[in-house]
Amino acid sequence: MNWLKKKQIREFLKQNPYHRLSSALEVSVAADLGLKIDANRATVDEWLRLSIFSIHQARTLAELSRQNVQFLSLEDIATAVNISLNQLKPFESVIYFAYYSALTPISVNINQASIEQLSKVHCIGQDLAVAIVNERQRAGKYSSVANFQSRLSLDGELMSQLSYYLYC
């Protein structure tokens, strides 16, 4: 009987390639059919194939990938969207991890960069980019990265990430 159900699911998935996989059997059949979701290049639509993810979570994962964040394991994905690893485990057979060499990071001078240039830097969103430029216009150039951190009241964790991309 299980083989009959599997056959029905196989035919259904062939006819409905964007069906949201919700059962372990559907995931198994999809994996047999060759469905693979590259965790480091997946689009929103690809993440949405897995019923565990909301549209917001799928967008978050796709955006992180666009920002060259690399997922190394299921744990990384679970952490990124605040779900338990146990919730994600049933989908493991259709998720794979390809690794890509990181592009040369964007490095910008915080005393010269525009809002647009700053917002392209890893970990700097539009709001922080605006704050950086506004503070620079208000109080003058940043004398050092430490001065930058102090004037914007940035925490150490964020600064440790930004230190690879910013200079005075």
Image (cartoon, helix red, strand yellow):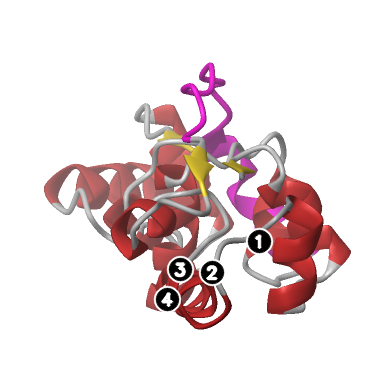
**Residue behind mark 4:** 130
Mark 2 or 4: in front is 4
How far across and how far down the image is residue 153, in percent?
A: 76, 79
Q: Are marks 3 and 4 in contact (CB under 8 Å)?
A: yes
| Vertical arrangement, residue 54 with respect to residue 86, above or below | below
Mark 1 or 2: in front is 1
Magenta extent: 85-106
Label 3 – label 2 distance at C-alpha: 33 Å
**Residue behind mark 3:** 129
Whether the magenta-drawn stretch holds residue 102 is answered as yes
Mark 4 or 1: in front is 4
Residue 80 circle label: 1
Dot 2 amino acid type: Ile
CA neighbours of label 4 inside 10 A, class few (<14), some (14 to 19), many (20+):
some
Q: Are marks 4 and 1 in contact (CB under 8 Å)?
A: no
Sequence order check, earlier mark of 2 and 4: 2
Dot 4 amino acid type: Val
The answer to whether residue 85 is visible is no
**Residue behind mark 2:** 52
